[in-house]
């Protein structure tokens, strides 16, 4: 029985959108599969890893009867990629096989029943819903996602805090050594406050899927689930349980030593200094004196790098160390000409902000050099 007959591109785009979350190794074989569901006017692709579910839809000509089947996602994806552009493809399901036909090419793939495919349950309780341009949400994620922990035993750090409150959307990430905070105004909601911790994998997948356009993305946050709807894609994700750290206590309220630095000049100086750092020790030393910021590092082979920037600074001298990777992560993801830096003493964290703006803050703990 024919499931669908259409062009290669109509099938390839939604399959690529959902396949990113599928892991190569699974205890459940069906989790390596993609669910194909045909109804009268569309073909829906669904992939899941139990925690995240992505649905993408391809519109088709009306006429086919509803049918569902699951098939190996990576094999089907590689087959479609290998076919010529513009090729017509037929998918036909019969005898626990999915046949892929295009021109003189034939592929028979093993299938599993669609009824066995695990789906995320609908969220319980009240949810908060907002809409904003895809490029704005993508830019917000870019400002903070690099500060997420990767495999911390404090599991609530392996994700990103998203908070909607009184017409404001805030995102915060921290790994315990640095913290990134960004906020944007959104339309007020009937439910005044909702905060959730989104898994790291969810954020990375959304960053890949969101477009740099003004097309809208609808965000629905409930106590158990987050749902993002944009274009022909719906991404639903379970949440990370736990209590996110009080980020407002981490952000230094007032540091006496303040200076402005050209973003590109600072970025280039740090990149040059980082050449002599090692994977085990990424420390760089800042020596701040009136009118000058010296950036230096040494390694175990007694090699040394030093750079100097002219700065409009007239305060007390300071000698402090930072992880150069933490600083470059921030500089690579902000889009501005200058960075404001507020410093305390050798043992105090540094606060980086954007001039005349309060919608971005980046806190970095110092390190011993």
Image (tube, grey):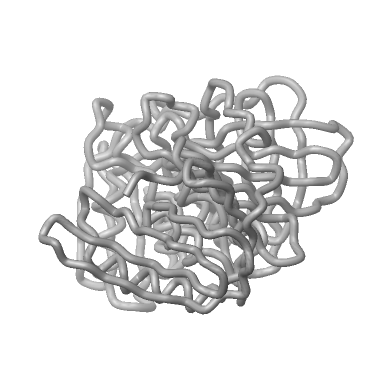
- Foreground: 224 or 92? 224
Would you say residue 182 is visible in this rendering?
yes
Residue 337 screen position, x and y as percent: 61, 77
Residue lying at 70% horizontally and 49% vertically, measured from the top left: 218
Residue 17, image quadrant: bottom left
Residue 106 screen position, x and y as percent: 20, 61
Q: Which residue in the rendered view is the most extreme toward the left?
A: 301
- Quick check: 184 left or right of 315? right
Residue 82 screen position, x and y as percent: 24, 69
Residue lying at 44% horizontally and 55% vertically, measured from the top left: 319
- Foreground: 357 or 122? 357
Is 187 rendered above or below residue 122?
below
Residue lying at 77% horizontally and 35% vertically, measured from the top left: 128
Is 253 rendered above or below residue 336?
above
Residue lying at 50% horizontally and 56% vertically, measured from the top left: 318
- Quick check: 254 left or right of 109? right
Would you say residue 134 is visible in this rendering?
no
- Foreground: 275 or 201? 275
Residue 200, image quadrant: top left
Is 283 rendered above or below residue 201?
below
Q: How many labels does the image show?
A: 0
Residue 259 screen position, x and y as percent: 62, 65
């Amino acid at each position: 029985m024919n499931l669908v007959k259409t062009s290669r591109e109509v099938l390839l785009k939604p399959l690529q959108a959902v396949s990113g979350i599928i892991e190569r190794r699974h205890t459940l074989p069906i989790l390596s599969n993609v669910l194909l569901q045909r109804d009268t006017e569309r073909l829906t692709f669904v992939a899941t890893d139990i925690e995240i579910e992505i649905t993408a839809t391809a519109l088709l000509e009306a006429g086919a009867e509803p049918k569902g089947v699951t098939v190996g996602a990576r094999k089907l994806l590689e087959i479609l990629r290998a076919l010529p552009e513009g090729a017509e493809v037929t998918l036909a399901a019969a005898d626990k096989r999915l046949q892929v036909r295009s021109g003189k090419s034939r592929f028979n793939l093993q299938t599993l029943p669609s009824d066995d495919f695990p789906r995320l349950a609908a969220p319980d309780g009240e949810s908060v819903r907002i809409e904003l341009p895809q490029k704005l949400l993508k830019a917000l994620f870019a400002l903070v996602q690099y500060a997420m922990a990767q495999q911390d035993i404090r599991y609530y750090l392996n994700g990103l805090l998203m908070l909607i409150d009184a017409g404001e959307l805030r995102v915060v990430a921290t790994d315990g050594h640095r913290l990134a905070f960004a906020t944007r105004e959104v339309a007020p909601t009937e439910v005044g406050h909702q905060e959730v911790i989104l898994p790291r994998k969810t954020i990375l997948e959304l960053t890949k899927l969101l477009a740099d356009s003004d097309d809208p993305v609808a965000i629905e946050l409930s106590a158990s689930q987050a749902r993002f709807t944009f274009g022909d894609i719906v991404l639903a994700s379970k949440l990370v349980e736990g209590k996110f750290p009080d980020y407002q206590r981490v952000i230094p309220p007032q540091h006496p030593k303040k200076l402005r630095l050209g973003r590109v000049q600072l970025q280039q100086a740090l990149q040059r200094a980082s050449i002599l750092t090692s994977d085990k020790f990424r420390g760089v030393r800042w020596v701040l004196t009136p009118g000058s910021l010296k950036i230096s590092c040494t390694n175990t082979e007694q090699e040394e790098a030093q750079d100097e920037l002219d700065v409009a600074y007239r305060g007390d001298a300071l000698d402090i160390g930072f992880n150069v990777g933490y600083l470059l992560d921030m500089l690579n993801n902000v889009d501005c000409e200058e960075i404001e830096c507020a410093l305390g003493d050798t043992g105090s964290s540094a606060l980086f902000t954007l001039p005349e703006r309060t919608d971005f803050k980046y806190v970095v703990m110092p390190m011993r050099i």
